[in-house]
Image (cartoon, rainbow, N blue to C red):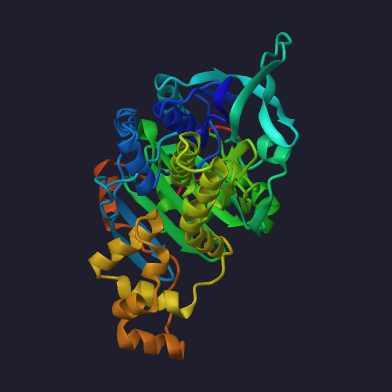
Amino acid sequence: MYDVIVVGARVAGSSTAMLLARKGFKVLLLDRATFPSDTLSTHQVQLPGVARLKHWGLLDRVIASGAPATRHVRFDAAGSVLEGHYPAFRGVYALYSPRRTILDKILVDAAREAGVAVREGFVVEEVLTDDGHVTGIRGRVRDRKKSSTLVTEAAQLVVGADGKRSLVADAVRAETYNERPALSMGFYTYWEGVPIEGNEMYVRDRCLIFTCPTNDGLVMTYVTRPVEEFHLFRSDIESNFLKTLDLAGDLGELVRCGQRAGRFRGTTDLPNFFRKPHGPGWALVGDAGFVMDPITGQGIGHAFRDAELLADAIYAGFDGRQPLDAALAGYEQKRNLEALPMYEFTTDLASFRPPNAEERVLFASLVGNQPEIDRFLGVLTGVVPIREYFAPGNLLKIIGVRGISKVLLNKFRVPHPRAAPYRERAALRQAHGRTPSPRASAGEEGSDDRGCRGVRAS
């Protein structure tokens, strides 16, 4: 019998299992995948998540994988362009955006090294209960060539870390609350030969474009639009993807001068909800307990945070410092307190509403004010509290009395939304002899494109 069985071995599950094993518990970690294994992801580990990787002794492994450190940021919205650096946080200064084939394997290996019994390729088919109390799981090793025997495992606590469509959550009928409908759809792909070293975010009319460097010298570009545009967008993914990148300064030109290094991956399965994350004999962590639109790229960092909160609560309950039910209730309360401000910010951003007068004045006021730009970037990465930053007193300090007048009169004029290309990028392309070739015809969905696309027509 195990102390804890964790169902799901990606970022939330493997982290929870590792932390519990390091506290001396007997833990079984199960996942239907075998690692390394890819999954849909924004790739970003925001600064709080990077700080936790460092505290756990795993950041050096991420760095050794070749995932580049990213500190420089370009944020382009409402006619204003803000460039700066993420503020330092608990001894870390940069974001990392590793491929999930790499990050998840690092975490699974760390759990195994901590003493966790890890079973990859194991499919959980049933959550076992006794008089309403979860007692274990039943499942089998996944083998397409032959059938495998059902295996039953028991534990004092079963943790569902099996994603937003959690089998564990369904089995215990975990209540959802603060639910919002799916707001966006998203597609991403990778490029090689694209000279981008920092994170870039472009907020445009009914779309957001994000790009970041990742492993193997690749750049990931992510495009998100309202969910109702999915079928139209999917009708010609490559053409629509590139047209959207063309809204982001010279980004469309840059990627056409590089080479696409993978297929387009996309989804509309982007719900927003909280679940009650505990009950008799069970708990939930990661997307199984709380999920929101990926437009702000917070998912991995939130999974690390909740893994730490849950592991501490389980330790307190099992160690007798407080009843387990009370400890798990405290876990839910702490999770919600930390998650709700970013949840509200994220779902508002994913609604694709036009920027209001206050935001236009704020962004314009930030231009040239480097300390405040960096603080705003700290909001985006989760180290500067959202409610503190957007408090009336702080906004007044940033935009001043004249800015308040502009807001009240609503006469702030918005410049053209298309950003000017980087001058330094043009110089870099010229230095490397990069010249765009004529636009080739759009490839098929899922195909690899190894040719250089031409620049858009003027």
Residue 24 higher or lower than 274, as above or below: above
Residue 366 higher or lower than 37, as above or below: below
* Image quarter of residue 424: bottom left
Furthest toward the top, the residue is: 146
Residue 122 higher or lower than 97, as above or below: above
Q: Name the spot of residue 228 as percent of width and height, x first.
A: 69, 58
Name the quadrant of the N terminus: top right
207 sits left or right of 132 in the view:
left
123 sits left or right of 371 in the view:
right
Closest to the observer: 397 or 124?
124
Closest to the observer: 406 or 144?
144
* Image quarter of residue 264: top right
Residue 300 appears in the rendering: yes
Total marks shown come to: 0
Closest to the observer: 328 or 120?
328
Q: Residue at x 43, y 22 (%)?
A: 109
* Image quarter of residue 431: top left
Q: Name the spot of residue 407 as percent of width and height, x first.
A: 43, 85
Q: Residue at x 34, y 58 (%)?
A: 378
Q: Residue at x 70, y 14 (%)?
A: 144
Q: Name the spot of residue 254 as percent of width and height, x first.
A: 40, 47
Q: Name the spot of residue 142 as percent of width and height, x first.
A: 66, 17
Residue 13 higher or lower than 237, as above or below: above
